[in-house]
């Protein structure tokens, strides 16, 4: 997965006050109608609304406007920690890591035990090469009995443990994510497929990959690349060619396709 790619962020994180992908109860997202929040005069409510708008602009691929909304949010309430957490993600996506780190640290100073802040900062650490350090933040997020999406933190912990080479820890976290998930846990299934592939348990890897592919549309480059290598290992040339065709057609500039062109199958 590319560093801070939008699909990865949406599946791994909670943006703003609401988890990514959920609908606002009181406000409809209309990029041309941000004036709807002008009537909110209470500083905390104003910060909340502009953080929600910033989150959705970020999800829509407009980080510049997202930063404007988050600036308004923090001007209204300088202690509104969700705005710092979301702005950290935006800065990270722009590779402004110094600013991202500063914002995450500010959010943690204000709300050290907030599960979403811990989850987001953990993912930031994992995606910037500090996989082992990230695990503590996912586990801290899971300490909260009020955390509404613990499967995300377990999936993230498993993903990052896998990147760090801790296969046993990764498997435990990912299986826990499957137990808790209410949406099919597509990312946990994909990571388990990768894990079993690394362990050489090809049949188990294929089962989890097949389940993951049923839940994703379109299939990600990561999933297609794993499928290609699984079929290659089994000598199924027709299936391998099918995955290769999809990878080339859908993601010709992806890192996975470049590895395919180089013949780097492991």
Image: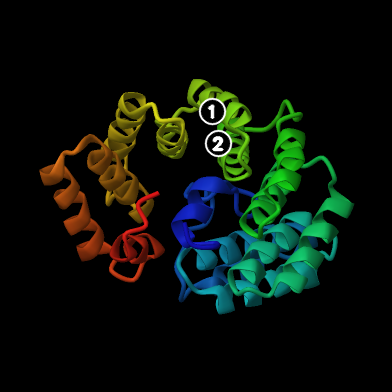
**Does the rendering let one see residue 23?**
no
Q: Position of residue 123 (x, y in %)?
A: 64, 50
The residue where tag 2 is placed is 155
Q: Residue furthest top?
A: 179
Left or right placement of residue 230 versus residue 82 in this view: left
Q: Position of residue 225 (x, y in %)?
A: 32, 51
Q: How far apart are the alpha carbons under marks 2 and 1?
A: 6 Å
Where 33 falls versus 176 (above or below)?
below
Quadrant in which residue 4 is drawn: bottom right
Q: Residue at x 64, y 77 (%)?
A: 68
Where 252 falls versus 177 (above or below)?
below
Q: Position of residue 46 (x, y in %)?
A: 71, 63
Are the two marked residues, 2 and 1, in contact with CB atoms closer than 8 angstroms? yes
Quadrant in which residue 167 is drawn: top right
Disc 2: CA contacts within 10 A as few (<14), some (14-19) or many (>=20): many
**Does the rendering let one see residue 22?**
yes
Q: Nearer the viewer, residue 46 or 125?
A: 125
Q: Nearer the viewer, residue 257 or 140?
A: 257
The residue where tag 1 is placed is 177
Left or right placement of residue 48 versus residue 181 in this view: right
Q: Nearer the viewer, residue 60 or 176?
A: 176
């Amino acid at each position: 997965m590319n560093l801070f790619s939008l699909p990865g962020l949406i599946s791994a994180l909670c943006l703003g006050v609401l988890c990514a992908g959920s609908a606002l109860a009181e406000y409809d997202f209309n990029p041309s109608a941000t004036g709807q929040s002008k009537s909110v005069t209470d500083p905390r409510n104003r910060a909340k609304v502009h953080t929600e708008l910033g989150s959705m602009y970020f999800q829509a691929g407009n980080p510049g406007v997202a930063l404007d909304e988050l600036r308004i949010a923090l001007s209204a309430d300088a202690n509104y920690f969700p705005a710092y957490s979301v702005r950290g993600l935006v800065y990270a996506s722009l590779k402004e890591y110094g600013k991202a780190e500063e914002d995450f640290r500010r959010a943690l100073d204000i709300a050290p035990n907030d599960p979403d802040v811990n989850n987001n900062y953990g993912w930031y650490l994992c995606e910037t090469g500090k996989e082992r350090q990230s695990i503590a933040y996912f586990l801290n997020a899971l300490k909260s009995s009020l955390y509404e999406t613990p499967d995300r933190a377990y999936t993230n912990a498993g993903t990052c443990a896998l990147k760090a080479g801790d296969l046993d820890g990764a498997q435990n976290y990912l299986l826990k994510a499957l137990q808790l998930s209410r949406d099919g846990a597509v990312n946990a299934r994909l990571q388990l497929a990768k894990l079993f592939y690394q362990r050489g348990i090809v049949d188990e890897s294929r089962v989890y990959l097949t389940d993951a592919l049923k839940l994703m549309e379109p299939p990600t480059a990561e999933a297609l690349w794993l499928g290609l290598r699984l079929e290659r290992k089994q000598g199924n040339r027709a299936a391998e060619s099918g995955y290769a065709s999809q990878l080339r057609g859908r993601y010709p500039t992806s890192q996975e396709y470049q590895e395919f062109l180089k013949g780097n199958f492991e």
